[in-house]
Amino acid sequence: MTTTTAPDTSDGRAGRRLFTVSAAVVAAAVVIASCSSSTGGTATPQRSATSKPAPVSTSGTNPPAAPPAPAAVSDEDQVRQTVRAFNDAYNSQNWEAYTELMCVAMRNQFTGVVMDYVKKNRANTGANTIKSIAVTINGDTATASITGTNEAIGSGTITLPLKQEDGWKVCQIYHP
């Protein structure tokens, strides 16, 4: 666990106010992000100058087949999508999207000095690349084991908890 302290205000309280940022969350901000690329477009078959288009039959009584229904996306794939989106937001420094991918309890902790630390860390360490995400689902919670590389820090593996809360959300929270 990484701990950062800041002086307490002069309101008469003794000691220091303690801000704790879980190592898993900081590591998540450091290690996990997707740098996938897509070339886009659709493959088009090539025809030679001598080929002719295939004939279209109009004499059949069967209507064209309906396209297949889209396959349901598994919980595991939904967790992977959340982790990748979380890291895309981190890499692009889209902090609104980044915090929207957190569970409410985590989002409530990621304000002020904690968010400032995440932003500073991103500026100092650069972008990340995900190499793999292994997912374990346990009811309405999940664990993602993420292996990736950071531009400045290098390679590493972290475990990140998620929670089903209006979709899968990253949910690493500090319990004082």
Image (tube, rainbow, N blue to C red):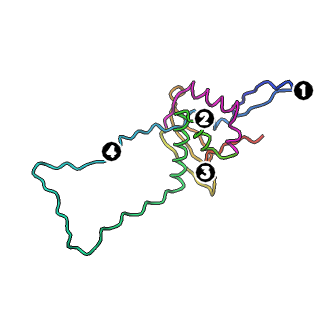
Ranked by sequence position, the earlier of labels 3 and 1 is 1
Label 1 crowd bin: few (<14), some (14–19), many (20+), radius 10 Å: few
> What residue does disc 2 label?
27
Residue name at image x 46 percent, y 36 percent: 35
Ranked by sequence position, the earlier of labels 2 and 4 is 2
Marker disc for residue 79: none
Residues at badges 2 and 1 in contact (C-beta under 8 Å)?
no
* Amino acid type of the residue that numbered disc 1 sits on in the rendered structure: Gly
Who is closer to the viewer here, 175 or 60? 60
Residue name at image x 55 percent, y 46 percent: 82
Ranked by sequence position, the earlier of labels 3 and 4 is 4
Q: Is residue 59 left or right of residue 150?
A: left
Ranked by sequence position, the earlier of labels 4 and 1 is 1
Marker disc for residue 142: 3
Q: Residue 54: where, in percent of width, then height?
A: 17, 60
* Amino acid type of the residue that numbered disc 4 sits on in the rendered structure: Gly
Residue 113 sits in quarter: top right
Residue name at image x 33 percent, y 45 percent: 41
Q: Nearer the viewer, mark 2 or mark 4?
A: 4
Report the magenta residues as a range: 105-129
Ranked by sequence position, the earlier of labels 3 and 2 is 2
What's the CA distance linking mark 3 and mark 2?
17 Å
Q: Residue 118: where, in percent of width, then height?
A: 63, 31
> What residue does disc 1 label?
12
